[in-house]
Image (cartoon, rainbow, N blue to C red):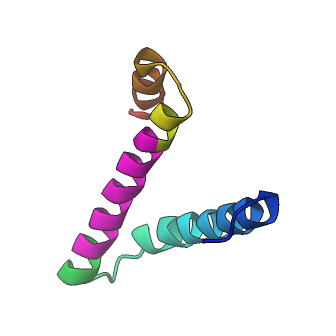
Amino acid sequence: MERGNDGLTLCIARLDRAMSEMKVYSRETTLDRADTRTLKHHAEDLVLCGVSVLRDLGIEERKIQALFEMHVE
């Protein structure tokens, strides 16, 4: 894994693109059951990774919980 600001910038750019593509695919009405399960699995992984990163950055648990409450409708 490349370290430093350039590596982080590249990682974030790739992640942004992947998340955007996942959102597009999630709106597809032609996804089969396997694709739906795969997309769901990776979306759950993103959530868990996000929580882990926030904890590693020292964000308080109540603030992490508030993020979920804010985005769930």
Tell which residue pokes out farthest to the right in this image: 6
Residue pictured at 35% horizontal, 76% vertical: 29
Q: Nearer the viewer, residue 41 or 8?
A: 8
Residue drawn at the location 67% of the way across and 61% of the way down:
12
Locate residue 46: give its quadrant. bottom left
- Image quadrant in which the N terminus is located: bottom right
* Residue 44 as seen in the image, left or right of residue 4: left
The answer to whether residue 3 is above or below residue 59 is below
Q: Is residue 39 magenta?
A: yes
Q: Is residue 61 above or below residue 54?
A: above
Is 39 on the left-hand or right-hand side of 25?
Answer: left
**Image quarter (top left, top right, bottom left or bottom right) of the C terminus:** top left
Where are the magenta residues, as a range? 37-52
User: Which residue occupies 42% across, 15% down?
Assistant: 62
Residue 55 is situated, as x and y percent measured from the top left of the image, at 46, 32
Residue found farthest to the left: 33
- The number of numbered discs placed on residues in the rendered structure image is 0
Q: Position of residue 51 (x, y in %)?
A: 42, 39
In magenta segment, residue 4: no
Residue 45 position, x and y percent, is 34, 58
Residue 72 found in image quarter: top left
Looking at the image, residue 11 lies above or below residue 58: below
Q: Main secondary structure of the magenta part?
A: helix
